[in-house]
Image (tube, rainbow, N blue to C red):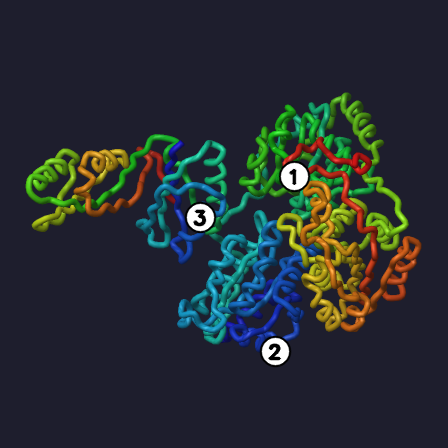
Amino acid sequence: MISGAEIVIRCLQEEKVDCVFGYPGGSVLHIYDALFKQDDVKHVLVRHEQAAVHAADAYSRSSQRVGVALVTSGPGVTNTVTGIATAYMDSIPMVVLCGQVPTQYIGQDAFQECDTVGITRPCVKHNFLVKDVKDLAITIKKAFHIAATGRPGPVVVDIPKDVTAQMCEFDYPKTIQMRSYNPVVKGHLGQIKKAVQMLQEAKRPIIYTGGGVILSDAADKLTQLAKKLDFPVTNTLMGLGGYPATDRQFVGMLGMHGTFEANNAMHYADVILAVGARFDDRVIGNPEHFSSEKRRVIHIDIDPSSISKRVKVDVPIVGNVADVLDEMLKLLDGGCKTDPEVADWWKQIDEWRGRKSLAYRQSNHIMPQYVVEKLYEVTGGDAFITSDVGQHQMFAAQYYKFDKPRRWINSGGLGTMGVGLPYGMGVLMANPDAQVACVTGEGSIQMCIQEMSTCKQYGLPVKIINLNNGMLGMVRQWQEMFYSKRYSQSYVTSLPDFVKLAEAYGHVGMRIEKPEDVEPALRKAFTEHKDDLVFMDFIIDPGANVFPMVAAGKGLTEMILAEEL
Amino acid sequence: MRHIISILIENEAGALSRVAGLFSARGYNIESLTVAPTEDPSLSRMTILTSGSDDVLEQITKQLNKLVDVVKVVDLSEAAHVERELMLIKVRATGKDREEMKRMADIFRGRIIDVTESTYVIELTGASTKLDSFIAGLDAGLILETVRTGVCGIGRGDRILKV
């Protein structure tokens, strides 16, 4: 017989969890005691529970394994909610273990009590309250199973303190069967055949792929399929790296800040192959405008509720992206004959490309786009790039050419400012030797800046690329364009001296103010200071805006381009 | 369009709140909801009366199926089914109204299940429209209290919702 706390740790060992991000407190003291007595599961002590969940989330995004966070009851749990919702929106597999007050105190407004299951319910794939130690191991097994299968997502397990003290035999099931949960894997073969036929008849095709390709580890299969068909490919923000960005067939990211060619190709295509993407508002803009063009849509997604949610689909295929693409490749191996008119379509796309929609104005100040371009060069295009939310995020997505999946780590769905630094920590725990840069801004970075302390403790050499324009840039951009330049609360005064701040935490700080200093500074950070966290405060042109731009409520082809202003 | 959704769901704490939370979070209507365990106590059967376009209904069933505790979902109103609702209604039954109430109950095949000097409690079962008609047929001033279970329904013949 072992205690519930020991069971928790044994379960983590059985799941081959090598790292947990967390913060101790009253109701998880037994678990922390059990954690202390072993070495298999490493613990990273964050400075705020929100960061624990973000780090576990990035651990998962960058490695395909399930991220794990451990927090105490009450405020420990409420602090995790932003992180859980972030992971939920992007379908990231994660298990969050939460302490709870002892079962006999539940409902009595005990110290550090909150209704964890109730508070997290709308932003988890599933959650559990374990009331009996006999259910503990099987519940944790279920949590890992649910988090990682089907459309992945975060699962919360709420464990009252008395349950962690009770003794029980430990028996960890190898597999689990749940009558109410049996996600589809294989796609319907008839539908797949229909799709393959439709693709070969297409005259103006586009392959539009999202986060599902990354989550399903299907980047190679997608690339093979696209190559076989010689069709243009566009990625969503979440799908970057699903297809090599440096390849000729890649037309760039689409959507609100997508390229001219990607948005036009998407809009005027006669057949869209949507793979693990969900036609959300930031991608297709106004759905009525989008639907004005006649086209046929094939949609592969593991979640049936994503299909025909915003855009009517002609050939729905429910299944795991990798499995479905596999079937498509097999069918095309028997002979792939695409329509000769596709050549004209490529001519049209090249004409759109000629518009060079990512060209940006030059300035005496450092342009943020330039910093990202240099970052790409200095890191050989092979770094993990984490990001926060705002202009810098879009610049990173547009100018860092991701050739591999799981290298672009950002909060796409929820758009959570503050994730960048803890994401960097999570990536480094999963990929200890990787180059990791956090492209951020002076607004976002301050939302989880306390984690510089965690980075010091565990020697996590994140390179913080702070694109500092002294403004909440994206808010400022919208105010400039749509609110007659009334810059309400978007100007950040009293910024800290980030160099001194980095130094105070024991790190290296740099302030870069001239364009010619950008590249040498980056080189220095990634060579001389390879093993240090370097806070690089780039003072950028305060007027830089993100283009192209599809204003909210507008159609995909109604882009505002850089020179049009 | 009016739809009756039947759900088989694991009989676990919080299962009801997952369904109710889904409806409110996604802006779907719940006109009535009934839930109770089935012959297998580990399963509950829930009946939800909702309304919406075909697209909305498609999303409702897909989203319900996505809930980990949900075992099966069916839109009963898609095909032949029977539906019933139970109402208990307390009415003033004095003077000439006392006889009138008895007569109304008889016409609607209701039963009087509680009697005092001045009140009746009438039990009435049927389609929701029948209960509505009963209420409409009474003098509103005589109705003291109304309680309705909401719709429950079952498919006709071979349409069976079971694990």
Disc 2 on helix, strand or loop?
loop
Q: Position of residue A471 (x, y in %)?
A: 74, 54
Callout 2: chain? A
Q: Position of residue A80 (x, y in %)?
A: 58, 62
Question: Counting residues from the N terminus, which is met first, the one under dot 2 or under dot 1?
Answer: 2
Callout 3: chain? B
Distance from disc 2 to disc 3, alpha carbons, whole Å, reads 39 Å
| Residue annotated with mark 1 | A552
Q: Is residue A153 above or below residue A3?
A: above
Residues B31 and A143: in front is B31
Residue at x-position 70% and y-position 25%: A202
In the rendered picture of this protein, how many numbered marks are placed on residues?
3
Callout 1: chain? A
Mark 2 crowd level (few <14, some 14–19, many ≥20, 10 Å Cα): few
| Residue annotated with mark 3 | B70
Disc 1 on helix, strand or loop?
loop
